[in-house]
């Protein structure tokens, strides 16, 4: 089966669309592709589905991590594929729903998932580049990985340093590392993107930010801080959490915090627009109802989203 993915910018309605299709067909389980809904205690600010909705439709990869733990695209890919296996075996239809582009890319395109390398390796390479010049590092790269060096510019510090970081950190060239640690997609996917008018989306973001605040977002962050979590935790990279934590600790203007969160969310949506616009093999939907009906037809085997 070709697995459907429902994605789009934040606040576009992707989760609700997947949920409605699941509710109407009774055949669907939803796999969240959201980098921060995995964390417990981050409910309001990540726009999680309600407990009632999760009781009515099975959702996966929500509330599976503590706020101080790291979660990655590699972990998501492995867990999502295992879930897809299980859901299909039980005669259900898996739907991927979420807006974290890197997670979706890992499913559709595969991922290079190499072991973590000590930060000092990169730091030493950066110091060497500053001291001896990038040309010296590029010459070193030619010696240890001529194949990769021939594919990149001699003036590309990010790629040169990354390739040497792999070599000195793992003891093998980046070319060999790609062969060893690359994971190809297990399934084929059809990707639908909700693509609303940008002005309307920004207005919706502004309204939703205020609604989240009124629902108790500040109290949610206070609960996290009181539980011993800090802004250094990976979960606090979610939009709004550091801003609210600073407001709680240092004081300030409530109006400023709300406006700043809305501004950061709009900027994030703009980056998502760019990412989805440049992604291949997608179909754009500017109508939620149309996508929902298309999704129901796909679930019932009547048509493809594409």
Image (cartoon, helix red, strand yellow):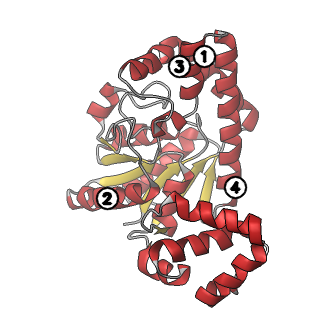
Question: To which quarter of the image does residue 125 belong?
Answer: bottom right
Within-10-Å neighbours for mark 1: few <14, some 14–19, many 20+? some
Q: Earlier in the sequence, mark 4 or mark 3?
A: 3
SS type, badge 2: helix
Of circles 2 and 3, which is in front?
Answer: 3
Identify the residue position indicated by label 2 in the image. Answer: 84
Question: In the rendered structure, are the residues bearing label 2 and label 4 in contact, judged by CB atoms less than 8 Å apart?
Answer: no
What is the number of the mark on residue 146? none
What residue would you read off at disc 4?
A: 277
Q: Of label 2 and label 1, which has the lower sequence position?
A: 2
Q: Residue 224 versus residue 193: which sits nearer the camera?
A: 224
> The C terminus lies in which quarter of the figure?
bottom right
Query: Label 2: how many residues lie within 10 Å, few (<14), some (14-19) or many (20+)?
Result: many
Q: Are marks 2 and 1 in contact (CB under 8 Å)?
A: no
Identify the residue at the far left of this view. Answer: 90
Q: Are marks 1 and 3 in contact (CB under 8 Å)?
A: yes
Which label is found at residue 210? 1
For marks 2 and 4, give the CA distance.
Answer: 27 Å
Looking at the image, how many numbered discs can be counted on the residues?
4
Is label 2 or label 1 in front? 1
| Residue occupying image coordinates x 43% and y 31% | 48
Give x and y (percent) for residue 80: 35, 56
- The residue pinned by badge 3 equals 212
Judge the density around disc 3: few (<14), some (14-19), many (≥20) Cα neighbours within 10 Å: some
* Distance CA(mark 2)–CA(mark 3): 32 Å
Q: Determine the image quadrant of residue 135.
A: bottom right
Label 3: state its secondary structure: helix
Q: Residue at x 76, y 72 (%)?
A: 132
Residue 147, x across and y down, in percent: 62, 89
Seen from the viewer's position, the closer of residues 70 and 240 is: 70
């Amino acid at each position: 089966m070709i697995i459907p993915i429902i994605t789009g910018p934040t606040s576009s309605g992707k989760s609700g669309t997947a949920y409605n299709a699941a509710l109407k067909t009774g055949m669907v389980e939803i796999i969240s592709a959201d980098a921060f809904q995995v964390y417990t205690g981050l409910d309001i600010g990540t726009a999680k589905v309600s407990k009632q909705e999760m009781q009515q439709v099975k959702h996966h990869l929500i509330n599976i991590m503590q706020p101080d733990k790291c979660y990655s695209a590699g972990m998501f890919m492995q867990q999502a594929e295992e879930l897809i296996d299980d859901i299909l075996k039980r005669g259900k239809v898996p739907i991927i729903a979420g807006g974290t582009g890197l997670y979706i890319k890992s499913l559709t395109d595969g991922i290079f998932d190499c072991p973590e390398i000590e930060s000092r390796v990169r730091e030493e390479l950066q110091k060497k580049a500053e001291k001896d010049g990038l040309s010296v590092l590029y010459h070193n790269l030619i010696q240890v990985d001529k194949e990769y060096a021939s594919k990149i510019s001699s003036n590309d510090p990010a790629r040169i340093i990354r390739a040497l970081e792999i070599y000195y950190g793992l003891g093998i060239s980046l070319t060999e590392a790609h062969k060893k640690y690359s994971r190809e997609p297990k399934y084929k996917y059809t990707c639908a993107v909700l693509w609303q008018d940008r002005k309307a989306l920004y207005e919706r973001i502004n309204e939703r930010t205020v609604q989240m605040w009124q629902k108790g977002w500040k109290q949610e962050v206070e609960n996290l801080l009181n539980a011993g979590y800090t802004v250094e935790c990976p979960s606090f990279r979610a939009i709004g959490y550091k801003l609210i934590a600073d407001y709680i600790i240092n004081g300030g203007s409530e109006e400023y915090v709300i406006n700043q969160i809305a501004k950061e969310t709009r900027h994030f949506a703009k980056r998502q627009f760019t990412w989805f616009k440049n992604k291949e093999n997608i179909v754009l939907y500017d109508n939620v109802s149309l996508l929902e009906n298309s999704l129901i037809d796909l679930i019932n085997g009547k048509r493809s989203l594409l």
